[in-house]
Amino acid sequence: MRRRPLTPAVVATVLVVLAVVAQLLRQRGTPAWDVVQSDDGYGFLVPVWTNDVVPLLWRSYAGYLQVVPRLVATPLAALPASWGAAYLTVTSAVITVLLGWFVALAARGLVRQAWLRWALALTVIFLPGAGWETTGVLSEQQFVLVLAAFWAVISVQRSRPMLVARVGVVVLAVTSAPLALLFLPLAAAIVWWRRDRTDAIVAVALVIGSILQGIAMLVSSGPPPIGPRTLRGVPSIYLQRVVASWAVGDTQLDDAWRYLGTPLLVFATALAVAIIAVLAATVARRQWIWAGAAFTWSGFALAVSLWSRGITEQLPVQEGSFSYAGARYVLVPLWLFISGLVLLAGGPPREDSPVWSGRTATIARYALVAQLAVMAVVGFRVDSLRSPGPSFASELRAVRAECREGPGRSAVMRFAPPSFYATVPCDAR
């Protein structure tokens, strides 16, 4: 009997499931499905247990809307409490994988080679820098949404399904992460340049979502900045935490910096400039615009993130010392930097480029993908903020044991890192 070939939908489902499982296996220490990070715990899990769900959907957290985490956390109100950690981790992994898939689809037409587009998608899913704070964390999916929003804005895909996906991504991104507001001028410039209806629809959706986010930010009081708001030192931080991280991998960055110091920044910068120069010399000039936008917004994203949180002074570039503090604020700049490289690598060739330069560019493309693959493999297993625990199952048992001592009580539930906790009323679940 002749076997029927697997349909694209079946293949896609299998790949998504495998990628989700791989996400769950990245974390060392406490299993990813048995730990809840602090922002997820007292920001979304406990509120769903203790409040009416519908009003929560539009309640700001940390001074701004986080619609996607709110929506995803809503079913926790009906699920067994023991499923909390696994649900948050698995849904976070699914969101990351689906957004990586979206980026690969949105890049069609701007990145010609399919293998380059999927290499880009894999960096979204397995970027080493994402392991420290964001892998398996629902509240941090906002950063993946911001990257996806960039590709939704610049995409040239105009089919109805892709238009719906682009609109959905930009609305969800900007109502979950204020950083997506940075793309408003980019979207406006694209509408003016392309004069295409689909781009205008995406831009309008971005504006509407931005208005909602802006209102929430105006009426909400967010946490105070961690330190003085300054841009002093941001260029050196960019070279270290973005360019050098791309060159040697985030999991090796601390050792490389302590051993090499400033020469590491010189090497990484020279390598990036060489690759950019080789690729730019062989692609059509209009491709420079898209790559330039990615590089430019990469710098904007880092500067705005560090300035708004007042965290610049927490990331000093000093010889002999290194800290992964603020890792979440480096993710979008790093992703956008890699996006710029991929846009140059996958652009249409210049008609007047000599044969030798085309061959050199081909070598550079393969070298770029090989480098990204090596960094993803080497940095696959990570020690994260969630690695030490505590175990969610153990914490839940302790809460239930304390609540059995009498009605009207409340109990403390710890989250990762262990110094963070929330008070849970005993009548909540």
Image (tube, rainbow, N blue to C red):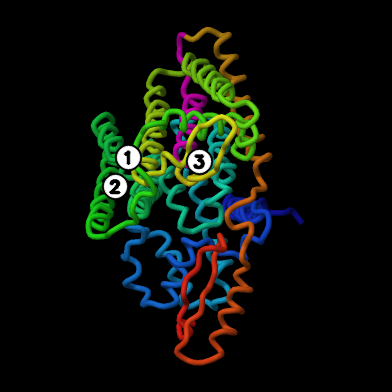
**Image vertical order of residue 377 relative to residue 4, above or below:** above
Q: Helix, strand or loop at disc 3?
A: helix
Look at label 3 and name its amino acid. Ala
Q: Is residue 363 magenta?
A: no
Q: Which residues are magenta?
A: 331-352
Report x, y in % for residue 237: 47, 33
Which residue, given by chain and number where applicable, does mark 1 sit on? 183
Which residue, given by chain and number where applicable, does mark 2 sit on? 206
What is the CA distance from the residue labelled 2 to the residue labelled 1?
8 Å
x 36%, y 61%: residue: 61
**Image vertical order of residue 8 relative to residue 234, above or below:** below
Is residue 21 or residue 228 the one in the foreground?
A: 228
- As drawn, the label of residue 104 is 3
Viewed as shown, does residue 79 lie left or right of 184?
Answer: right
Asked if the residue at tag 1 contacts the one at tag 2, i.e. Cβ–Cβ closer than 8 Å, the answer is yes
x 45%, y 81%: residue: 425
